[in-house]
Image: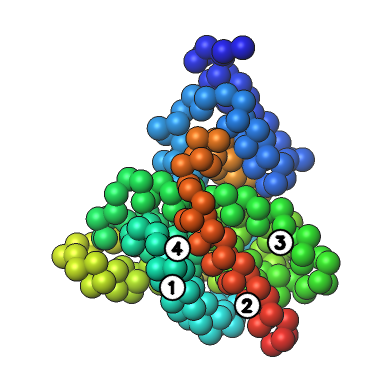
Amino acid sequence: MKLSERKRKVIFITAALFCLLPFMSAPLALLLGLAMAQLMKHPYQELNHKATNLLLKVSVVGLGFGMNVFAAMKAGKEGVLFTIASIAGVLILGYILGKVFKIERKTAYLISAGTAICGGSAIAALSPVMKAEEKDISVSLGIVFILNSVALFLFPMIGHALDLTQSQFGMWCAIAIHDTSSVVGAASKYGEEALRIATTVKLARALWIVPLAFGTAFLFKSDRCKVQLPYFIGLFILAMLANTYLPFMSVLSPYIVSIAKAGLTLTLFLIGSGLSFKVLRMVGMKPFLQGLILWLAISGASLWAIMILG
């Protein structure tokens, strides 16, 4: 039965509000969004990406009010070597796979960059620098969001099966899961320490968008080096500083963090609601294989390194 636009809007808003209830988890919200994407046309399709992007940034800043700046700095330092090695490795492997599968150069590059750094944020930042076409952007975003959805369910199961510590799991999430929303969603299921480490390392990783943008402009012989800096990372740091040094924040912080977690749950619902069969069909087999191989490679290699190094 075809639903009117008004009914679709009512159903969508009701489902979104349902995701804000205390018992809703990130995976359940994502599942609900995915189900709605297949059952009805999105009533706010044009606004969905913008809303997801803004809500994610606000929620991440809110999480900063639950973190200590000294603990965050320690986690960030521990993740530097993993970050450099994994970014370089993914970009090189992505280039090789793009050639092997004969994927359009810009599409292959965006998939590699999204896997290497921070998913949709990296793709959105680099596409104007390299003058990517709409199809290149849509395909790479589709692959990132599909694999993010899988990771949100799969990673906590693997972590528990391998008996990973909170620290190990948080580091693994930050390196091997593309988008910040799914990193936080998976890590929050594992524990508070895992969430703190995963969020800090992932945001530090996102800063690599800036040097990569200059490299991208050189590779694609573009004179457009303007890139949107991830300004919300600065706000996240200010939130951590406030929580560390301002005594009265100890009263407010738990409430802010609770609201931020609810915001991230809603973010995952919005991401799921944008993954219709149309999006899945548009991706194509060869680009999807490139994204899948890259994701499996970085997931497996980083997990091995983290377990070996302790």
Report x, y in % for residue 39: 62, 26
- Asked if disc 3 and disc 4 are in contact, CB closer than 8 Å, the reply is no
Residue visible at 74% across and 71% down in the picture: 166
Total numbered labels: 4
Residue 167 in view of the camera = no
Q: How far apart are marks 1 and 3 (CA)?
A: 27 Å
Residue visible at 65% across and 53% down in the picture: 150
Question: Where does label 4 land, which residue?
Answer: 101
Q: Would residue 255 appear left or right of 56 to someone viewing this image?
A: right
Query: Which amino acid type corresponds to the residue marked 1 in the rendered image?
Result: Ile
Label 1 Cα neighbours within 10 Å, binned few <14 / some 14-19 / many ≥20: some
Disc on the earlier residue, 1 or 3:
1
Question: Where does label 1 land, which residue?
Answer: 96
Disc on the earlier residue, 1 or 4:
1
Residue 210 in view of the camera = yes
| Kind of element beneath mark 1 | helix
The quarter of the picture where the C terminus appears is bottom right
Query: Which amino acid type corresponds to the residue marked 2 in the rendered image?
Result: Ala
